[in-house]
Image (spheres, helix red, strand yellow):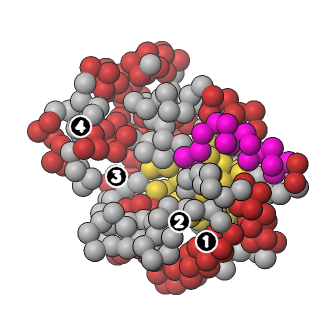
């Protein structure tokens, strides 16, 4: 299977990342373990989560996803060598705080390591920019943790192009670790958020791109085609209702045609479109059942022809 490199970090993995936001939320612990087993047994390695997952769910306080990963690793420690684990900090955690200060990062890293039953994190990411903390303080703290063996590489999420460029300059000027990856919100119906300045900055700096919401909260799977379908979403109707418009339906039409042409699913086509983008390293995508996972893992084998790509580009422009 094709392997892709993440920036200049040396981390390599198959071009699909499993989004752990569902662990302990829409996928219970037992189901999450089965999904993780199937994922790594199929030759995939990249599992992405965050300390804040899934504090939005009733009765949750954050850390649920990492705890599920930890119980999975505890059940079979050999899995650690098969998995590339990424997590994040910076969002508000109840009774803990937020941001990218030295104190908050160190405390967050130790808490994540404990929850996940591991001695190190392969990719640690700033979940969102913190303009109240000097970039040098954030990067130097990451440098300490890398030297201590707790982190292998660092990345960013939800950063704007100017701040990503500034972080790259500080890292170079001060001899500090640089962000090797960016997690932007990017998919066929959300192109302007990433394309243009942010995409060009990632290409310029050789920063790996691992987009989240790659299937637009499930809309690109094709299962939401009218307001009557919105009740199917575990996130509620707000997540996909905004895509029920002329543009959204045009994208679904192009996905339907490409899926039929390539004898695959809309899901696989939507992910294949992302994977053929020059800047994208691997899309992050979630599944709550083995059947859903099967569609995701089929995506790397789908090689879209030029006409299908052009139709998708046009519909989503």
List the residue tagged with mark 3: 292
Residue 263's spot in the image, x, y percent?
37, 32
29 or 107: nearer the viewer: 107
Q: Quadrant of residue 213?
A: top left
Discs 2/4, front: 2
Magenta stretch, main secondary structure class: helix
Q: Which residues are magenta?
A: 157-172
Q: Residue at x 48, y 29 (%)?
A: 191
- For marks 2 and 3, the one nearer the N-term is 2
The local crowd at label 1, few if under 14, some if 14 to 19, many if 20 or more residues have their Cα within 10 Å, is some
Specify the label residue 241 is tagged with: 4
Discs 2/3, front: 2
Residue 268's spot in the image, x, y percent?
42, 39
Q: Secondary structure at mark 4?
A: helix
Specify the label residue 98 is tagged with: 2
Looking at the image, residue 121 sits to the left or right of residue 98; the answer is: right
Check if mark 1's residue and mark 3's residue have beta carbons within 8 Å. Answer: no
Q: Quadrant of residue 168?
A: top right
Q: Is residue 267 above or below residue 10?
A: above
Discs 1/3, front: 1
Residue extending furthest toward the front: 132
Q: Secondary structure at mark 3?
A: helix
- For marks 1 and 3, the one nearer the N-term is 1
């Amino acid at each position: 299977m094709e392997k892709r490199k993440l920036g200049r970090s040396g981390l390599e993995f198959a071009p699909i990342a499993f989004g752990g936001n569902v662990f302990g939320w829409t996928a219970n612990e037992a189901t999450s373990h089965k999904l993780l087993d199937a994922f790594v047994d199929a030759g995939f390695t990249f599992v992405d989560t965050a300390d804040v997952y899934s504090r939005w769910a009733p009765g949750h306080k954050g850390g649920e996803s990492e705890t599920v990963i930890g119980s999975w690793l505890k059940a079979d420690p050999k899995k650690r060598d098969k998995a590339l684990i990424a997590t994040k900090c910076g969002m508000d955690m109840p009774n803990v705080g937020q941001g990218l200060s030295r104190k908050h990062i160190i405390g967050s890293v130790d808490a994540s390591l404990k929850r996940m039953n591991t001695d190190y994190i392969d990719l640690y990411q700033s979940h969102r920019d913190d303009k109240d903390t000097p970039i040098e303080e954030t990067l130097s703290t990451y440098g300490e943790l890398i030297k201590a063996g707790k982190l292998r590489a660092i990345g960013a999420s939800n950063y704007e192009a100017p701040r990503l460029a500034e972080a790259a300059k500080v890292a170079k000027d001060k001899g500090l670790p640089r962000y090797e990856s960016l997690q932007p919100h990017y998919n066929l119906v959300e192109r302007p958020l990433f394309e243009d300045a942010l995409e060009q900055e990632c290409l310029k700096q050789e920063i790996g791109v691992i987009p989240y919401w790659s299937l637009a909260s499930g809309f690109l799977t094709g299962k939401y085609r009218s307001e009557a379908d919105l009740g199917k979403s575990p996130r509620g109707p707000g997540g996909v209702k905004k895509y029920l418009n002329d543009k959204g339906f045009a994208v679904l039409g192009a996905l339907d045609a490409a899926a039929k042409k390539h004898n695959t699913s809309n899901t696989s086509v939507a992910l294949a479109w992302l994977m053929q983008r020059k800047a994208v390293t691997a899309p992050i995508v979630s599944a709550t059942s083995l059947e859903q996972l099967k569609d995701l893992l089929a995506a790397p084998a789908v090689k879209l022809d030029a006409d299908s790509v052009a139709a998708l580009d046009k519909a989503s422009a």
